[in-house]
Image: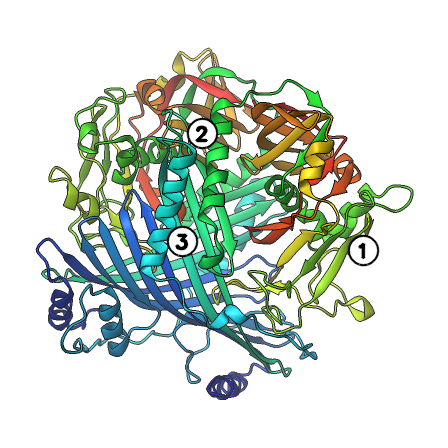
Amino acid sequence: MPFVDLDTTAIARSLSQIADREGDLADAYFERREEVELPADDDPPGIRVWRDEGFAIRLLRGGNTWLATRDQIDRSLFAESLRQVARVMPAAPYPQPALRIGAFPPTDIPRQLLRFPQSITREIRRRLAGFPMRLQVRLHRRWVRVVGTQLAPEQQEEEFFSLQADMPWGQYGALLPQLDAQAIEEVASSLMLLFKAREAVAVEAGHWPVVLGPSACAVFLHEVVAHALETDTLVLGGRIGAARGVRIGSELLNVLDDPTGGPERVRRSTDDEGMMVVRRWLLRNGEVEQPLADLFSAQHSKDLIPGAGRRSHRHLPPVPRSSHLELLPGDSSFDDLVADIDEGLFLPEVAHGSIDPLTGRLSLRVPCGLRIRNGEIREIVGPCRLTGQLSDLLSSVTGVGSEVVPATGAGWCAKGGVKLPVWATAPAMRLENIEVAS
Amino acid sequence: MKQRHLAAEIFQGLAAAGHESGELFLKMGRSRRFELGSHGRVSGASREVGWAVRAGSARSSLFLAGSGLPRPDMDWPQSDGKAIQLSAARPIPAWRPPVDLDSSLVAESEAIALLEGIERSLLGELPKSRLIRGLLDEGTSETSVFNTLGVDVSFRSRAASLYLEAVGPWGGESSVSLMVAAREVRRLQPAAIARRLANRLALEHEGTAPAKERGEILMAPPVAIRMLAGLLPLLVGGGGMRLARRYRDRQGRIGSSALSIMDNGRYPGGVLEAPVDGEGSPTGEVVLVDEGHFCQALLGWTDVSGSARPTLGCMRRDSWRDMPRVAPSHLFIKPRPEVAAGSLVASVTRGYYLVEPTGSGRFDFEKDQFWLPVCGFALRQGNVEVPLAHARLEGSIGAFLQGIQTVARDLAFQPLGGMVGSPSLLVTGVGLSRTA
């Protein structure tokens, strides 16, 4: 608990000296990270540990942001940073508030991290398979505390795992809330599917009905709903407020961003700007309700609610991003979703997704899938690419599954060079007439 | 001196914990960052301090890295059963630090003036176009490497980078982006950069897609650089030698006699110019391909043993967070000072002048195939006939290497992992087609 004893009053007092104009916003962001990696077998040295801490001071004034960051938490560096961010040199030196922080405790390396690669290999063998694979697992821990001139919310903590598997036929990556039996089962199943698909025939290019599994649906929604409704995307197209109330998709789409509802160890009550997070309706019955906004955007539009500001690390300013997307379940069982498909595709996973914010064109790279024929799941097919215009894709949703799987990782988002983990709770989804390229 | 003392204390602490060999990597720096974009104007100033320790023995090893400075009395994480090898100290040839190391970092007013200057020039070149993102970074750093085998080196660096994204006046089209790097922001030329962006935008909008075409292909440096970057699996790491065998002709050449490729960690004026690599081994020029003959791939000292072990270091370490890895620092195709790029344009009777890549493309060494999305112009008798876009440069990797007819003198570098450089290349034996 490194930042619980920070003297927030003294920090707030210091910050108020640089926020000297009406409408100014100043805050201090304290961050500590610890990462533990178990690299692949052939990659010495073995266990790798990163311990990283520092702070950022920010001043927001109108359309300008000034940011000063340091890799150590120290009172003299804090005063120096205040001076760098301040727009007017003060008559007296800035005060140096005491910055009491807890020392880095000895690194606790969870046993399940050390055992995970063997557990995966064992689970694959149990399925009567075995193949070469380099597996790298990483534990991510993060503590943040934001202190503003008026607000000093509690410290926030996150803990999760990431995994990267390299095989001769491709790569697989996942974000995992825990390394438990369910994670072993999910990862082994995905790796087995990729193994079986290594020599599968490619999908014929064309337009097909497609059923996205929960994991693929999470990536799809992240690209076409979350990115599309981030205020830094909306501003490229003109007025942000104009998006509200516009129907952009099927009535079946009820999509929220809820940082309080993700996997237990990544739940947040405040964002990386110290603002209360909200259960934010992005789409209600296919209609845009509340875009994802941070403090910068909310300062420029009264209709926007902040609380979606995220920082990949202290050296970069916050950006509006989703944390945990949630697609409310529909009323179709999985069998209902595939029942009347004569010829189509079931895609359980998406390897990579991207959307062009200017043209609205989506591209999802799919490592493999399963053919649907006469309402039944049939043979495995090779890699393909789904493409289409955002509005066409969202309008083509004709079914949302009723079975919700627990919240899990949607993957690493890297929009604009800002790398952030994103989470999702989504059922399966059916889309009609989707352009599939081989 | 302070750092040397700290390193000694760290090594003592490691020895007490049973780790007979150890390495301390320290990096400290200052940087400025400026951005114009959908979040208004952002101006940042950072001081970065970080360290990394690798330690262990023939039976176990560990890696611990952190921000700030390391404490000799810290708790070392548990080591595992993997052996660690550290680089032994080697004599470092004399190196004169670049003169720009002491010049000040870009000020906020200068940075904003540069970004606004580019925006203005872009508007001048292509009215109603828009710069939607401009991101300027400049930093200096001091790196020190110590190890228990006698490595004890420090050096300073400096680098600046600029990323730009712009849209044309037409609406409904994708943006185009550009990334350039230099040692100093002050060396960036706003008018030339804006012209490159404007050309890309205009070509993407007005260019016509080719049918299946062949002919002489003149690649401007940005296209040739992307081709060279695509060849990295052939030029870097243990797999390169195996791939090179596949491309050798009867004379033992993998490319035409016009092709010489080298990597140089001390490239004068280069963004990554340094006397040593990330493990403290001396850097220098390594010839990888000499007049078409494959000499060697860029290898780390742990990749080979005995007399074949390279004497020059190429273990790059971008920050204290990164493990050392074999990587080029300034990888480039050797230019020919007597050949002007303009004379190559004039010499093309029927062919294409490809000025920019529009994506990263794909290089498949198993199938001996490549493709790279490009834009440029069709040339007839040395004159521009039509603009070209939505085009794909494609063919066999072997045919590209053997088909390099002439190399010009306009060597330029781009940041693609390391700095990758090439002059204009006149090539035959590859073709163009329409992108899917």
- Label ID, residue B331: none
Instruction: Quadrant for residue A415, please give it.
Output: top left
Residue A19: x and y in percent read: 13, 62
Give the chain of mark 2: A
> Helix or strand or loop: what does disc 2 sit on?
strand
* C-alpha gap between disc 3 and disc 2: 29 Å
Q: Is residue A46 above or below residue A116?
A: below
Ranked by sequence position, the earlier of labels 3 and 1 is 3
Q: Residue at x 54, y 59 (%)?
A: A39
Q: Is residue B400 visible?
A: yes
> Foreground: A351 or B262?
B262
Q: What residue is shown with label 3?
A: B136
Residue B18: x and y in percent read: 55, 83
Quadrant of the rendering where the C terminus of chain B is positioned: top right
Which residue extends farthest right?
A: B250
Residue B170: x and y in percent read: 38, 24
Q: Is residue A47 above or below residue A132?
A: below
- How packed mark 1 is, by other alpha carbons closer than 10 Å (few <14, some 14-19, many 20 or more), is some
Badge 3 amino acid: Leu
Badge 2 amino acid: Ser
Residue A153: x and y in percent read: 15, 60
Give the chain of mark 1: B
Q: Is residue B331 left or right of residue A5?
A: right
C-beta proximity under 8 Å, tags 2 and 1: no
* C-alpha gap between disc 2 and disc 1: 41 Å
Q: What residue is shown with label 2?
A: A363
Mark 3 vs mark 1: in front:
3
Q: What residue is shown with label 1?
A: B295
Mark 2 vs mark 1: in front:
1
Q: Is residue A147 above or below residue A420?
A: below
Badge 1 amino acid: Cys
